[in-house]
Amino acid sequence: MRRHSLGFAGVALAVFCVPVAGACTLGTPGTTRRVAIGDTGRSMLFHVPGKLRGSAPLVFLLHGSNGNGAGILAQSGLEATSKRNGFLLAAPDGGIATDKGYVWNIPGVPTVTGKVPGPEDADDVAFLGKAIDWLAARGCVDRRRVYATGLSGGGRMSSWLGCVAAERFAAIAPVVGLRAGNPSAADPRFPDPATCTPSKPMPVIAFAGGKDATNPIQGGGAGYWQYPMRTAEARWADLNDCRRALVERPLESGVTERGYADCRGGAEVVARIVPGAGHEWVADNEAMWSFLARHRR
């Protein structure tokens, strides 16, 4: 096994090139390590839970624009949720570097830099697909239980995965970033249906802050945002052939929950709004995992 060190946010992290054959060897249970992914030239941080036994559920945790994997691990608190529930947690860096961090390649919409990704930019969907294959080949991951969540730009990226790589993911959980395709060029108050055509029903749980000024739930904002969150929820309900809208209700925590049920293939669409919260990690991590865990691809 080769070991290298990388400087990352002022911390030296180990990069383990995992050998082929044998049991899954991503790192010591209960630890977080950076692992090189095959011949992709890219790596990601993995938190390995103590309960990991053979192929496990995998949750991709995607950082916000200008962020990185280490930052979203610290911000989200999902390492503790991984430890309690025994899923593998992966935090990659986006494929497009900026002067502040990384952004994700969502074709057709500008990043926070204002630039629309081009053919010269890294294909993040392909990279995450290769990571799934690489992990599954090593007995680390159950392909039926692969999920994506993320904050802001990472929430938009996890939404994009649901749109274009549904055959890879069992469910998605965007945080302050739910989309259902790119804003329409003809009328950005609505998504362009041609940009979100999932190959199967996609269970969705989304979290948002009622006072988010960056990705406002009422719509508007930057060019990549525009249409309201309710419109995204309704579009996912249409894509999943949901037959029943759930009555909006307050939870004991003060969070408002709404959504759609009786969907094709057992899919669901759930939205949780934290009224007083802004553009931040507003997810109830245990509720998120409970939702993801009941879905299989």
Image (tube, rainbow, N blue to C red):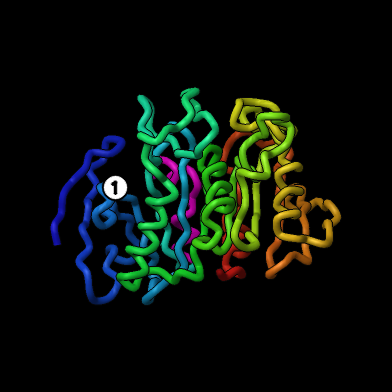
Q: What stretch is highlighted in magenta?
A: 69-84
Which residue: 76% across, 48% down? 234
Relative vertical location of residue 282 with respect to residue 115 in this rendering, above or below: below
Q: Is residue 93 magenta?
A: no
Relative vertical location of residue 209 with respect to residue 254 in this rendering, above or below: above
Q: What residue type is labelled 1?
A: Arg
Residue 153 location, x and y as percent?
52, 38
Which residue: 56% across, 64% down? 170
| Secondary element at tag 1 | loop
**Residue 109 quadrant:** top right
Q: Name the residue under label 1.
A: 42
Q: Is residue 79 magenta?
A: yes
> Would you say 260 lies left or right of 193 here?
right
**Residue 98 quadrant:** top left
Residue 194 location, x and y as percent?
64, 44
Residue 122 location, x and y as percent?
36, 40
Quarter of the image that includes the N terminus: bottom left
- The front one of 180 and 98 is 180
Which residue: 78% across, 52% down? 258
